[in-house]
Amino acid sequence: MQQESKKQFFISYNKADLTWAEWIAWELEDAGYAAILQAWDFRPGFNFALRMQQASKEAERIIAVLSPDYLTAEFTQPEWAAAFSKDPKGEKGLLLPIRVRPCEPEGILQPIVYIDLVDLEETTAKKTLLDGVKTERAKPPVKPKFPGASQPSVFPGTLPRIWNVPHQRNLNFIGRDNLIAELHDSLNSGRTAERNQTVYGAGGVGKTQIALEYVYRHADDYQLVWWLHSEEPATLAADYAGLYGKLGLLPRDTNDQGYMNDAVRRWLAENGGWLLIFDNAVEADDVRGYVPQSGDGHVLITSRNPGWQEISVERRIEPLSSADAVELLLKKTA
């Protein structure tokens, strides 16, 4: 009888983290790896101790699902100790910790670099997991951006492939640098709760100009930037449906706006690298149906009204300081 092929991973976990262990196993096998998981492979009637010993031999690498429960449990240590004994210097990566809840590994686990999934949304967590289990160098496939210029000029050749921003950059924009930096940090934090941001305040306070400046400063972060006039439901629906053709979705000859909007929302939920700007939105319920619940993208909303906590982080915008207002006036009259 031919010997069964060796599995890539044995997943060691505490029962408190079963859902995490199953999610990790599913994503690994969906990506073409083979995994051993107690909940799936240790069936009734099996000799637990014998099956555990076999699993540690069958698997090339052992994943330790790190959490406070895992680190304090008595029966998890022998599961990862076998891999550590075979690779005490960590040169082969036989022991691969994955942190799923806040905790601090101690002892011999402390110096081992772990994959950190804490507070990540699912799309980002999946990419982090699959990138982390690779053993080759993590050199990116494309040249990194030059980091020297803090505010690089954006020329047409560097704009995203899909782009419909209706305004030119305001060359007289002044102030708000800290706010724009905070927006950028929050949107790129990897936390699901922060990937949607709303700036609100009285009319004329500069909300649209803030969104516009953010778009131009960070245009090269995205492959798709789509501006949505959101003050009227019909205009918002039409602008959103306009993405259907730009994305090349099928069928091409449909005029069903509801179908197109559903297809756009599904595409956004399954892809990343996009930024939607809902400009002059009135209430959260007006845009809620257009905001994807997943996908590795960002949403920036401007509004006169508060009340966006259910779908985004909201930030109140105050008028420019006296010093900034004077500088803006001098800049315009120069």
Image: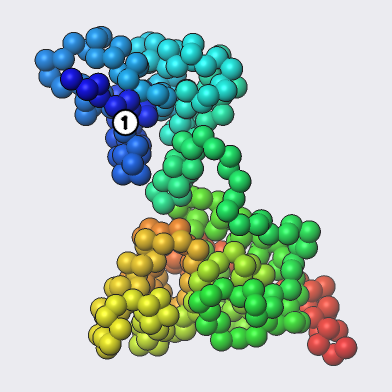
Q: x, y percentage for residue 78?
A: 39, 11
Q: Is residue 124 left or right of residue 90?
A: left
Q: How many marks?
A: 1
Q: x, y percentage for residue 289?
A: 33, 71
Q: Is residue 274 above or below residue 130?
A: below
Q: Is residue 215 above or below residue 197?
A: below
Q: x, y percentage for residue 278?
A: 47, 76
Q: Is residue 18 left or right of residue 239?
A: left
Q: Is residue 192 left or right of residue 154?
A: left
Q: Is residue 231 left or right of residue 220?
A: left
The N terminus lies in quadrant: top left
The C terminus lies in quadrant: bottom right
Q: Residue at x 47, y 84 (%)?
A: 229
Q: Determine the residue located farthest toward the front in the rendered image.
A: 1
**For this rendering, which residue is in front, 311 or 4?**
4
For mark 1, give the secondary structure.
strand
**For this rendering, which residue is in front, 294 or 326?**
294
Q: Residue at x 36, y 67 (%)?
A: 267
Q: Is residue 79 visible?
A: yes
Q: Determine the residue located farthest toward the left in the rendered image.
A: 45
Kind of residue at disc 1: Ala
Q: Is residue 30 above or below residue 105?
A: below
Q: Residue at x 45, y 31 (%)?
A: 98
Q: How many neighbours does mark 1 have within 10 angstroms: few (below 14), some (14-19), or many (20 or more)?
A: many
Q: Is residue 34 above or below residue 266?
A: above
Q: Residue at x 50, y 63 (%)?
A: 273
Q: x, y percentage for residue 32?
A: 33, 41
Q: Is residue 317 visible?
A: no
Q: In the rendered image, which residue does mark 1 sit on? A: 35
**Quadrant of res 24:** top left
